[in-house]
Image: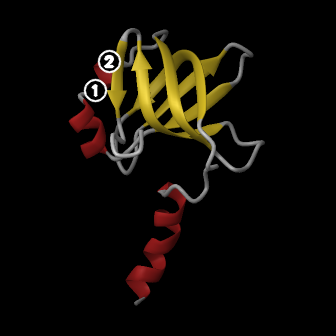
């Protein structure tokens, strides 16, 4: 029981409950990318000079989609589709699909 209780905050943090129901998209350029676990994150500079955390799925989802860190060099143009964090002061979104240049990576194909 203790193990489950300790895991609950991590599950809640990376689940969908902290994100809005409405579809959201944003575009910008890659600042950095880390596709390690438990979820990958791409830091994206938008047209207003703000840096967003574009949260991806777990490594198995990224791998299944064909997404690698090599596909996300700094300066690459990206567009992300998914759901914005419920806290409007938090520049974060959970991503269903990510376009890098002309290639689209379907991170959560069952949600897109």
User: Circle 2: is it few (<14), some (14-19), or many (20+) Cα within 10 Å?
Assistant: few
The residue shown at (36%, 42%) is 108
Please, what secondary structure does the residue beneath circle 1 have? loop
The relative height of residue 6 versus residue 29 in the rendered view (above or below) is below
| Residue nearer the viewer, 64 or 68 | 64
Q: What's the residue at 71%, 42% (across, down)? A: 90
Numbered tag placed on residue 68 in the rendering: 1
Crowd class of label 1 (few under 14; some 14 to 19; many from 20; radius 10 Å): few
Say which quadrant the C terminus sits in: top left
Residue 23 lies in quadrant: top right
At horizontal 53% and vertical 69% (from top left) the residue drawn is: 9
Q: Position of residue 41 (x, y in %)?
A: 46, 36
Cα separation between marks 1 and 2: 5 Å
Please report contact status of discs 1 and 2: CB closer than 8 Å, yes or no.
Answer: yes
Q: Position of residue 87 (x, y in %)?
A: 73, 49
In the image, residue 39 above or below residue 49: below
Residue highlighted by disc 2: 71
């Amino acid at each position: 029981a203790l193990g489950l209780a300790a895991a609950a905050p991590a599950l809640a943090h990376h689940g969908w409950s902290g994100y809005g129901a409405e579809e959201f998209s944003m575009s910008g350029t890659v600042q950095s990318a880390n596709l390690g676990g438990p979820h990958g994150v791409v830091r994206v500079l938008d047209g207003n000079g703000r840096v967003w955390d574009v949260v991806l799925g777990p490594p198995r989802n990224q791998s299944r989609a064909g997404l690698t860190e090599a596909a996300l060099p700094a300066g690459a143009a990206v567009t992300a589709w998914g759901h914005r964090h419920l806290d409007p002061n938090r520049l974060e979104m959970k991503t269903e699909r990510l376009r890098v240049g002309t290639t689209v990576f379907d991170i959560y194909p069952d949600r897109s």
